[in-house]
Structures are given as C-alpha cells and as structure tokens.
Amino acid sequence: MVDISIVELGVYMLIAYSGMLMLIISTIRESPTTKSQSFSRAVYLLPSIICAFMIAGSGETIGLYDSISSGIEQGTATSLNESFTVTLINPVWILVNFMIGIMMLFHFIMQTLQLLLFRD
C-alpha cells in the first residue's frame, strides 16, 4: 500500500522546510513590535506546521508511479498492475519531521501569546 506519492512528498517538503527556514531566519532577526507583525508571522507558519505533520504521518512507503498493462495472450485477456515504491530503511525522517512540526507549533503558540499580550 502506497501512503504518499513522490510529488506530494516534494510539495509538502517544500512548504514545511521553507517554513522551518523562515523560523530560523526569524530567530536571527529582531522580534516583532506590533500586533499585526506578530499575527502575520503566526499565520504564515500554519501551512508549514500542517505539512510537517503530514510528512511525519505519511509512513515509510513513498510511491513513484503505478503501471497498468493489459493485453491478450493465447485468447485470454490479462491485466497486470504494478506499483513502484521506495521504502525508507531507516524511518528516522518521520521523527525528524515530527520534531520540526512540534518546534513550529511551539513557535506558533508563542507568537499567538505575543499577539494577545502586546500593547500598541
């Protein structure tokens, strides 16, 4: 059984890891001073959190493509269904993506608390 396709994995990884890069850059820069800046930082991180948890929950099997062949051999119709997959030998990447999702979720909670506590 294929849990996720290679295209889905690529899109989810792009979104999740760009959010992680944004989080790293935001720790280097100064923190926001207004409610609107805190709100925009928190909202832009939501898709990355969702994608990180989707990658973590996708499983160890990544599907490349499915092949369906049909034909007639000796008067009998035959159909051959093949799935080409990649299976992760060391599923540590599931844990790594789960930790990335937790870090971004923690940052989202902190930004939301700053949103509620800032005085403009």
Image (cartoon, grey):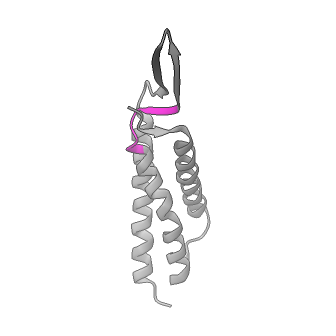
**Along the viewing direction, whichever of 4 and 119 lies nearer the viewer:** 4
Q: Is residue 79 above or below residue 104?
A: above
Left-right relation of 84 to 91:
right
Residue 86 lies, in percent from the top left, at 49, 27
Percent x, y for residue 2?
Answer: 42, 34
Depth order, front residue of 9/110: 9
Q: Position of residue 85 (x, y in %)?
A: 49, 27
Q: Residue at x 40, y 82 (%)?
A: 116
In the displayed structure, 118 sits above or below 55; it is: below
Q: Magenta segment: does it hold 97?
A: no
The N terminus is located in which quarter? top left
Q: Can residue 30 be spotted in the picture? A: yes
Q: Residue at x 51, y 16 (%)?
A: 72
> In the image as oriented, which residue stretches furthest toward the top?
74
Looking at this view, name the residue that lies furthest to the front. 75
Q: Is residue 33 visible?
A: no
Q: Which residues are magenta?
A: 56-64
Which residue is depicted at the point 39% across and 68% down?
A: 109
Looking at the picture, tell me which residue is in the foreground, 84 or 19.
84
Q: Position of residue 99 (x, y in %)?
A: 41, 47
Q: How many marks?
A: 0
The residue lying at 41 percent from left, 60 percent from top is 105
